[in-house]
Image: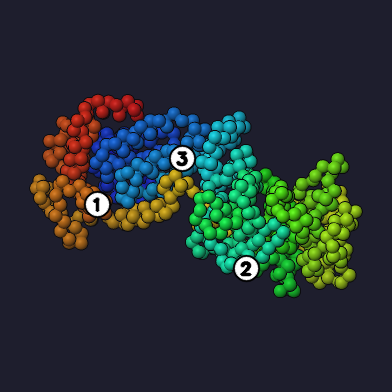
Amino acid sequence: MKQSSDDWISSWQANCKNLTTFLAFTTPMSISSKSECLAMTRAVAIYPHLIAYIFVHLTMYSSNLQPLTKLWEMGAGCRHWDDHTCLLKYHTVLECLWNLLQENDRDLSIPGCNLRHLLALDMDILRNKVENVLQDKKSKEQLLELCASDPVPLSNLLQTLLDAQNETADFKRLVVRMLARIAKKSGCYPDSLVLQGIQTKGTRPVAGGGFADVWKGSMPNGNEVVALKAFRVYTQSVRRKILQRFSHEAVIWRQLRHPNILPFYGVHAGGDESGGDEFGELSLVSPWMDTGNILNYVDANPQADRISLLADVTQGLKYLHLFEPTVVHGDIKAANVLITPSLNACLADFGLASLRDSQESTWDTTTEKAAGTLRWQAPELLLGDENGETVLPNRCSDIYSFGCLCIEVFTGKAPFAEILRDTVVVMSIMQKRTPKRPSDDLSEIGLDESMWNMMEQCWQSEPTHRPTIVQVEEYFNGRNGDGRRPPVVRDDLPAGVRSTLGQYGFSDAYLDEVSNREDCSASVDPVARVPETRDISNPDSRIQSANSIIHDIALTDLTTLRRLYADGTISPSVSLYSAVESYSNRISLFMGDITRLQVDVIVTNHFLVDRKAIFVGYNTRELSSMMAQMWR
């Protein structure tokens, strides 16, 4: 008996905000009921802590046996799941547990408990299963095949794990690779990447380009100002096609976290068949930068430290090039380098060139799509390789474009500024000509002989002869010296962007509500709540509450009893051996040694009345045998 009690205490000790309050609340549970709960949670392969929470919730608050029976059946069904099955079907268990809570009374919390912590422990179990599967090549390939029919739940789980701030770099690398493969194979996003409810500001875009317009907007909570780069796509069929083809890049971009990389929040596909958004453009969403791009900033601040800003860009580009899988920017120019509120430079619009080029038929004309970009492109992107095959943007071409960015930052002008027509610029690049050095002496702002030599190295016609981003970064760090400003790192994601599993139940909003109730119940001494208990043998006895309000309670008024017990007005305070003896023969097979319970008279009475009613028409011996077999 003592062992069972010790097991119950130890199983909850680390998972409660106030263990004393929780143990007092669960005193009416019988020894066998607690043992059954522990046996169930030890047998299941998934969500053991949440299952224990729901078991206690149903036992203490429900007078209906059916939800508890559903819990038993669900637990029995997932006892022998392997890791693959757990990762593919975790959401069905979560939905089932949420529905059981909804059927009972989701507004009733368990005093002293910590539901958010219990869910976090269960997520740790899922996280370990993910790591076990992804570290084994055969197991990983098997998971990829098994999720093909319904990839979104697994994608949601992986994205939720990636958005956690306490994961190791090695684990994140494994998960990003898997998530990218799922997206490429299925064309599906995690739910959190498709943003809803974003409101645009104004009736016109604040900027525009050859294939997209930039709008200013805000997240649904109104606290986060965002930029929406809206593609000029006019049909639903084209929107769906872009979303699908774009999924692989989008899930990678979503994981990028660096102070010199503009965060990518997700895709806003308002105006689709689901409705609900007036803004109907397909858009990429990122934080809004009031200071504008690097060229705007140096124009407004002629004494700005250009070398320090370019060093920021090298840091961001190094992060992209060393990321696994590698991310190529593909469109490095001043317009795509933004200045943060802390006056650091950060790269934006990484990878959009490949998206634009892959969707050539979507835009109005090829010339329009290319306008404004050709001056920064490496010659191999225009000429192709020795076999005439198209060369896609790559790390070497990014280095070439970075050299062109340097020209912009030091002169305030685009590369080949002396040539007005883009077609002539293309011919010059194809002839392996490079931008001309400015005739003005710009050494005071950083463009000296050493800097020009570095830029010329970036423009080598043979891509493999160009320096790597690591070498370029080392050069700028050497030039920048001790004057380098520490970047401001932002690890958090705004509400509505961070991935959760709330779509399957137990949303953050619900957990916040429960946490507040748990805090309130845990802050009260469970023994001190009832200063006086009247004659316990008298059913009409009155309980004096701590605030001196008299509660006239009938034993059959179960709704009032549950409410008063839940909010702490009444609580366990006395032993009632004699009061429960008349019930022991009827229910001892299910409840265990009920005469050992220490419970408040009213709570005990309504608990026993409920159980007595439940067992009318049931053969308790058969029921007890069935439960014992289920969790043996």
Q: Which numbered dot is residue 563?
A: 1
Query: Could you tell me the amino acid type at mark 3?
Result: His
139 and 377: which is toward the camera? 377
Residue in the picture at 71% in, 69% down: 296
Label 1 vs 3, first from the N-terminus: 3
Splitting the image into 4 quarters, where does residue 3 fall? top left
Q: Is residue 165 left or right of residue 75?
A: right
Q: CA distance from mark 3 to mark 2?
A: 41 Å
Instruction: Report the quarter where the C terminus lies.
Output: top left
Q: CA distance from mark 2 to mark 1?
A: 52 Å
Q: Considering the numbered disc 3 on the image, is that residue within a helix, a strand or a loop? A: helix
Residue 621: percent from left, percent from top = 22, 26
Q: Which numbered dot is residue 534?
A: none
Label 2 vs 1, first from the N-terminus: 2
Instruction: Report the quarter where the N terminus lies.
Output: top left
Q: Which numbered dot is residue 91?
A: 3
Query: Could you tell me the amino acid type at mark 1?
Result: Arg
Q: Is residue 34 left or right of residue 225?
A: left
Splitting the image into 4 quarters, where does residue 431 fall? bottom right
Q: Nearer the viewer, mark 2 or mark 1?
A: 2
Q: Is residue 70 visible?
A: yes
Residue 473: percent from left, percent from top = 75, 56
Q: Which numbered dot is residue 290?
A: 2
Residue in the picture at 80% in, 64% down: 414
